[in-house]
Image (cartoon, rainbow, N blue to C red):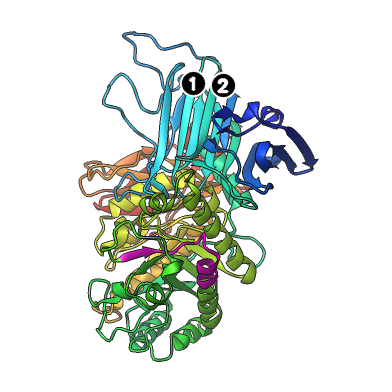
Amino acid sequence: MELLLENDLFSFFYDGRSCRECVLSRTVTRSPGGETRVYTFPEGLRVTTVLTVHEEHSAVEWVNFLENTGDAPTGLISDLHDCDISLPLAYEAPPKWTAVRPDPEKSTRILTPRGSNLCADEFNYRRQSEDSFDSVEMLFPGQHRVFSSVGGRSSRGDAPFFNIHKAGQGYFFALGWTGQWRADFRRTEEKICICAGMEETCFRLLPGEKIRVCSAVLMYYKATLAQSFNLWRRLVRDDFSLIGRPGRVCEAPLSVTLWGGMETSEMLRRLKIWDENRIPADTIWIDAGWYGTSEIPSPDEFEGDWAVHTGNWLVNPHIHPDGLLDVAAAVHHGGKKLLLWVEPERVHKNTPVAISHPEYFYPPENAAGPDRLLNLGSQAAWQYCFDTLSDLIRRLDLDWYRQDFNIDPLPVWRKSDGPERRGISEIKHINGLYRLWDALLERFPHLAIDNCASGGRRIDIETLRRSVPLWRSDMQCSVNCPPEISQSHALTFAEWLPFSGTGTGINADTYGLRSCYAPALVIRAAYAQSRSFGDDAAFLNMLRCRCEEYYQVRPYLSEDVYNLTEPGAASDIWSVQQFHRPSDDTGVLLCFRRAGSPYETAYFPLKGVSEAYTYLITDADTGEERIAAGSVLSEKGFAVRMEEKPGSKVYFYKRKR
């Protein structure tokens, strides 16, 4: 990483000239954890790069701040790239026509996950091109690949995480921007060049104006492809996530979710049933529909007019006469934490705040449309939002604040930008979002934030350092989402994120519940008032058994992960995932035989186990124990037999002393 410490990390054009031709001065202040670089340019422009070193993980991160210190607008800043670097990578010959297909083990590969786009393949990096002799993963000298988000949400389209791998070494790169980004990778014979930042910038800064733009994280590694993902997971878990920080939650939650339009009396009744049946959970999640003034019943998300009240963040007195205070008291009295859904940035145009304070909102892309976008770049709008959320958190003593965002903001931002100010609306909005979350976390030192945006459409390194995506995909919104989709997501999201979550179907059985085991798990069995809950003793007993089992599994789910099968939603395959804890050489296997699979028995070589030891493997269902040598487990594999299909098995293993 010394190369990064020696070179500038950004680029832009300043009045049509390369910024490197316009620098008036450059100063560097070093500290044990990194350094700060200050660049001055004509017309009072100052650029500050703050670089932090994560020495234990062979990683660095940096972020750029731009400020106008003069008394007139700066020159025109265009094509701003917060990352513009060249990194050494082992020699690779230029491509040529040949009868032999390229070897992916020897070629340069750029692996980046698909964003959350309502499919079974979300966060999957495995992409095939239409040309059978090439792959969009491979990057040869003279070629380049371009990736970007869609619509202004950072993980819709592509997600801003990249694994650049060649022959047992490479780099992880992440772009920290919760808006519209673009990343360009170019391969030379001995280097990889990365040029990344906001997709469109062309603006002047006004006197006194200061902004921050994208951050970047770069981690170098020497490892197999599978192990490189674990090195990345450890970096995010140890140095970025708030999970386990002093005063914060120690693990992502096991939640019971209730529709917010459910009447208070029914919420309390269902919570009592849950407790009386000794079903473990640590968090009660109140979803949308709890707000506004409608008198129309809303027993589930498909009934009532709750949606037109989005933006009126007063607890609906017709549904919750005590303003949810009685529910909050019952939750906390039962030793559980409380989570509440809010969507502060998207407001229905007929809500009180939209009518009384139109200046808080951007001019809409379509005036006839129902939604308005709150302008977090406006101090008055930001203060309104912060005060509103703070009041909810304080009054209900919230432990988790869930922020959703169900709108593509990019067209609105771009419509709002005037001449020579392209990109400013987006920059100020995203700066406002970060400031909002940082201020809430500072004011409420116990608080945790759940980041949702139509599922997982706002996942990037900046949101990961402030929040957890407890609901990583809206594919699970249907009450009968196929469990195989959750299995596939488990194999893809886990490679990039040490903490994320998903939800079960309302009537999920053991197979369906286990399919959703993730670092955070949302149980939806009690969700809707329109569906009965509590009158099926066998179902409640199954829930208790699975939740007890989940608590045994959960500690492993943020440790090292190994996918023993490929992701996919096909009905005739097995899906198997291994989580291994290196610190004590223990782990868990989650195994699924799908309904169309013709194979009763399959062998799966385990990763991370030591060939010098023997291991005790325990079947979580039967308690049956098997002993196997590490050499056998890693070479021949562990035999899993399932007669039932679809079927599931959970195995715990530990090294014998």
- SS for dot 2: loop
Residue in the foreground of this view, choosing between 282 and 622: 282
Q: Position of residue 191 (x, y in %)?
A: 55, 20
Q: Is residue 613 visible?
A: no
Residue in the foreground of this view, choosing between 116 and 436: 436
| Amino acid of disc 1 | Arg
Sequence-earlier tag: 1 or 2: 2
What residue is shown at x 21% (from left), y 41% (from top)? 598
Residue 376 lies in the magenta-colored region: yes
Q: Is residue 141 visible?
A: yes
Instruction: Write the start and end of the magenta stretch as one range.
Output: 371-386
Q: Which mark is residue 187?
A: 1
Q: Which mark is residue 575?
A: none
What residue is shown at x 59% (from left), y 50% (from top)? 206
Residue 222 lies in the magenta-colored region: no
**In front: label 1 or label 2:** 1
Image quarter of residue 123 = top left
Q: Position of residue 91 (x, y in %)?
A: 54, 14
Q: Is residue 608 left or right of residue 39?
A: left
What residue is shown at x 49% (from left), y 34% (from top)? 163
Tag 1 near tag 2, CB within 8 Å: yes
- Residue at the far front: name it: 72
Tell me: residue 398, above or below residue 154: below
Image quarter of residue 412 = bottom left
| Amino acid of disc 2 | Leu
Tell me: residue 272, above or below residue 519: below
Q: Which mark is residue 89?
A: 2
